[in-house]
Image (spheres, rainbow, N blue to C red):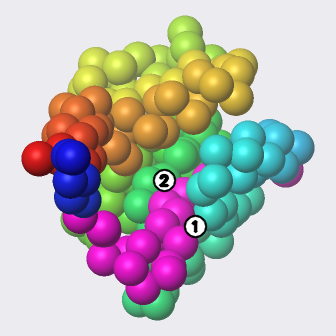
Amino acid sequence: MAKVKFKVDDMYMNNQEPVSKTILVVDDDLSVLSVIKCMLECGDYNVLIAHSAESAIRMVERDDLAIDLMLIDVLMPEITGPDLAERIQAIRPHQKVLFMSGCTESEVVRVKVLDRALGFLPKPFTSDGLLERVQNILDPPVQRAAAASAQSQMWRVE
């Protein structure tokens, strides 16, 4: 008779739920914030919203707030998304950022985002498109493949 051996991840041994990632969404349009918040929450992400650069910076300055990704609109009234990202990365140098905009022909989008090969998601986007893009940034395919390989090693028949 074959014996089945398996390893149990420490997270599940302690009866803890997997930790969800936190995304800070920055956009000056409250209706856009609301829709994106719903989309991301359906993907089991914790979502923080900021309707201005100032409120986003206040959140980033908090040491008790872990932010795994920032999703920032490129064109906002008081500052461009790339300029806001520079200010944020002065506070949190390794902060991951994904830009979004409905104005893909804009000079700001072209010069400050596309020409610099920064992550960009054109509006409008679907929930699936957003969740796939976010997952690829937070958990790159190579990393997912390694995790899947490790997961397959959890079950072994002898």
Residue 87 to residue 118: above or below? below
Q: Is residue 14 left or right of residue 127?
A: left
Residue identifier under label 2: 70
**In the rendered structure, does residue 10 fall within the stretch colored magenta?**
yes
Pointer 1 and pointer 2: residues touching (CB < 8 Å)?
A: yes
The residue range painted magenta reads 7-30
Q: Is residue 146 left or right of residue 82?
A: left
**Residue found 28% across the figure and 30% down from its top:** 141
Residue 30 to residue 104: above or below? below
Q: How many marks?
A: 2
Q: Quadrant of residue 59?
A: bottom right
Image coords of residue 151 (percent x, y): 26, 47
**Residue found 38% across the figure and 34% down from its top:** 136
The answer to whether residue 141 is seen in the rendering is: yes
**Secondary structure under the numbered disc 2 in the rendered image:** strand
The answer to whether residue 100 is seen in the rendering is: no
> Seen from this angle, which residue lies furthest right?
31
Crowding near the residue tagged with mark 1, few <14, some 14–19, many ≥20 C-alpha atoms within 10 Å = many
Along the viewing direction, whichever of 21 and 67 lies nearer the viewer: 21
**Residue found 19% across the figure and 38% down from its top:** 149
The type of residue carrying mark 2 is Met
The type of residue carrying mark 1 is Ala
Query: Of the residues tagged 1 and 2, which is closer to the observer?
Result: 2
Crowding near the residue tagged with mark 2, few <14, some 14–19, many ≥20 C-alpha atoms within 10 Å = many
Residue identifier under label 1: 56
How far, Cα to Cα, is label 1 from label 2?
A: 9 Å
Which is more N-terminal, label 2 or label 1? 1
